Amino acid sequence: MISLARCQPNLGTYVEISVSGDVSEDELIFASNAAFLKIKLVQSLMSFHDEESELTRINRYAAREPVPISLETKFVLEQALWLSEKTDGLFDITVAPKLVASKALPNHNFDLSPTGTWRDIVIIDNEVRFTKPLLLDLGGIAKGYAVDQAINAVDDSINITVNAGGDLRMRPWRGNQVEVRHPRSPHSESIQIQMKNRAVATSATYYSENGVVIVSKEPSASINPNENISVSVFAKDCLLADALTKVAYLDPDMIKKSVFPDIEFMTLDSNNVINWY
């Protein structure tokens, strides 16, 4: 069996892709290239930082007129709205104004005084519009989606692991372990955890600045953490794991109250105490 590991900067972090199989090295290079292309596509569509991205166009115009969107962005927006409904708004992609105000996200001179909520996002066919002024950030869900897209771009005959700064999915996953950074000293300490599902994502205060939790160097939610812990969510896909880490961090009981199939999550505190839910 031949193995190949590659790493590229993208999605505000470093994306590591490992592939292996009873195939040629050229086939593994082709497979990893296909996976990286999907990562780059999601970045180009959903980056808040990129002034030319589809998300930027949505934020700039959707309060005035319907904005055409790609199938990829439509899917992520629909999933985000479903998650907001299931979590009573705890998962919220309209948090961007707080992140811009705290300088966790760049200021593109949008209206930072929105009056709407996630309920004011309307998707009809392949267009989106806001019924009230809004500002969206997909940083809490798009990275997980990108990991899923990368996995799906590679033939099932090839083993693959994609790790985008803590958002990880692997095929096959049974019997494997994953490394979780220790919240006490994330740059030097980690623990090994058995994989519980195909994907896992971790949120923590590793890079906390001004009360904004920054996960893998990307802002995820505007909250004031009360303790130094990490939350790791295991799910069937990385989009769901990515999004639910924010919910589990803010309100662990919400995961248990909501209907999310095959979800397990754990917390790790600075005293090395692990709790499973």
Image (tube, grey):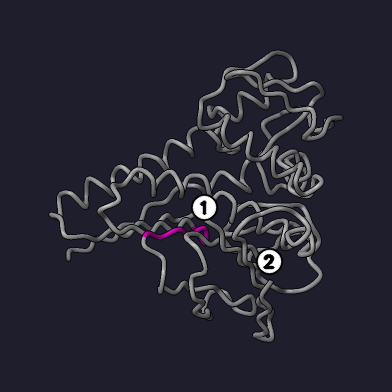
- Most common SS among magenta residues: strand
In the displayed structure, 166 sits above or below 8; it is below
Q: Quadrant of residue 162?
A: bottom left
123 or 40, nearer to the observer? 123
Secondary structure of residue under mark 1: loop
Residue 202 in the image: state x and y as whole percent.
59, 64
State left or right for residue 217 relative to residue 172.
right
Tell me if residue 251 is in the magenta stretch: no
| Image coords of residue 67 (percent x, y) | 62, 17
The residue drawn where x is 47% and y is 72% is 178
Taking 220 as reference, is 154 left or right? left
Q: Which quadrant, please, contains the N terminus?
A: bottom left
Residue type (three-letter) at the residue carrying disc 2: Thr
Query: Where residue 271 appears, x then y in whole percent?
Result: 69, 86
Q: CA distance from mark 1 to mark 2?
A: 23 Å
Q: Which residue is mark 2?
A: 205
Q: Nearer the viewer, residue 209 or 10?
A: 10
Q: What amino acid is found at the position of numbered circle 1 in the picture?
A: Asp
Question: Which residue corresponds to mark 1?
Answer: 237
Magenta extent? 165-171
